Amino acid sequence: MFTLLTPQHSFAHCLRKKSLFLLLALGLVSGCKKSVETEGLPIACPTIVSTDPLNGSTNVLTNKKITATFNKAMDAATINGSTFLLTQGSNQIAGTVTYTGATASFEPAADLLPNTKYTGTITTGSKDPYRNAMVSNYTWSFTTSSAPVVTSTDPANAAANVALNKIVSATFNRSMNAVTINTATFLVMQGGTSIPGVVAYAGTTATFTPTNPFTNNTVYTATITNGAKDSSGNALSSNYTWSFSTLPSSPPPPQLGAISQFGVFGGTAGVTNEGLNTMINNGGIGTIGASTLITGFHDGMTGDVYTETPLNVGNATGGIFAAPPAPGNATSFTTAQQAMADANNLYNSISPASKPGGIDPGAGELGGLTLSPGVYKSASGTFDITNGDLILDGKGDPNAVWIFQTASGLTVGVAGPAGARSVKLINGAQAKNVFWHVGSAATINGAGGGVMTGTIIASAGVTFSTSGNAVQTVLNGRALSLNASVTMVNTTINVQ
């Protein structure tokens, strides 16, 4: 429907509009309060219709972009850092203000503090295109969420004697975003050098596995940076750093000298095999006695036979060395004499007199224990490995050394078909660095079976298994006796 205006009506209408715009421009009339119409449209005061976060919100992300939406389009030039403010108490937060559509946004220059109350303000300096301002400032508040924290580490801060193959870990108080747990946010440093490794995350725990073992007697620093975020996007409030030091350097292993080439040495009394399947790998056997004191073997290098029978066959792959008569000779006797001298030196070098301070963690019973490198001395004078296997933990150090000292005997295993016991190596431990100083005799798995480890040097003989046992008994190391024979039944000795 159209209304026909007379020239007088039209002139008056235009005059009223022009007068009204002049009054609005001069600020003498508030278009908002008077609900003035321009071209038939009401001019309403701008207001805030929504905010994000909402007023009174809690657990707001610390990297949150703050927004306020108006009821109408605004003059973008009036939406700026002086009309959109974010404060924390009396402190104004630095940030960037942008405006699109009907929404103003404030992006903080840095993440907000965790567990902190903030206040957003849109001032009356914000105006619409007709220069209408809000009746009053609009304010609202919200509180950020708490930051995730590291609750524990392994190793702990300032830990000492840390294993060289240690997997470093940090546990958080909540689930984290696994994508943010990586080699850029979980670092291990030695001084200014970054240690290469693999970072993984599971449950609430991050782990760092070094590519190579750590170095002895060295301080390392681990850091979880504030780039690590929880599943809601909250970052650590600051970097979390802790340090630890590794095991001291291992002492050098005892020197073997000429005895190193022997898997079995019978001192003054010889070597006996009582089985069809005895083998000395990577080493020979010897005695300073006559060659007739070696029975049940043949020389794997020369083919010489030392009293083998159809029931007693043994192969000494590294040769046999003894005094005449043949096949012993002066040359092999000289080699055996030097080995005997070096065996005595070895025996003395690992004795309590030379290596004092040994401990006895199992009151003479080593079975069922896991032992770190060190010196161990039986308080009772004997060591047994009968309650289970003995485990030697190298803690990632290939040079770790164990010395076991007994004034009397060493017994490994118990009677019965399931009685065999073993000495097992883990985390870099090596058989060549394990030594047994035995004051009298050593008996190794009398029922057959099992895997013994290390160089056994006894004053009064070493015996493996018992005649008639077909189950193979293994020694990774050496069996050395000074004053009595070494006897084997179906035994494999792998010289280490």
Image (cartoon, helix red, strand yellow):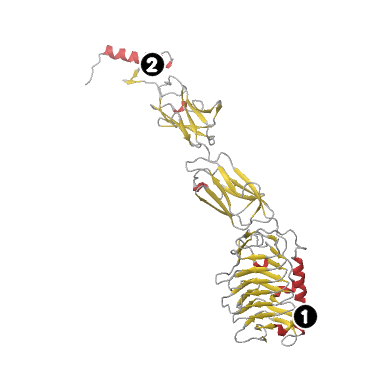
Q: Which mark is residue 35?
A: none
Query: Image check: 292 left or right of 490?
Result: right
Indicate the quadrant where residue 383 lies.
bottom right
Expressed as whole percent of the image width and height from the top left, the position of residue 356 reads 75, 60
Q: Nearer the viewer, residue 135 or 341?
A: 341
Residue 438 lies, with reference to residue 132, above or below; the image says below
Report which quarter residue 337 is drawn in: bottom right
Which residue is found at the position 23% from the left and 17% from the top?
A: 4
Q: Are marks 1 and 2 in contact (CB under 8 Å)?
A: no
Q: Which numbered dot is residue 334? A: 1
- The amino acid on which the numbered mark 1 sits, given as a three-letter code, is Thr
Type of the residue with mark 2: Lys
Q: Where is residue 339 shown, x and y percent of the image? A: 75, 75
Instruction: Count the numbered circles shown.
Output: 2
Q: Secondary structure at mark 1?
A: helix
Which of 167 and 39 lies nearest the eye of the viewer? 167
Q: Residue at x 70, y 55 (%)?
A: 248
Pointer 2: what residue?
33
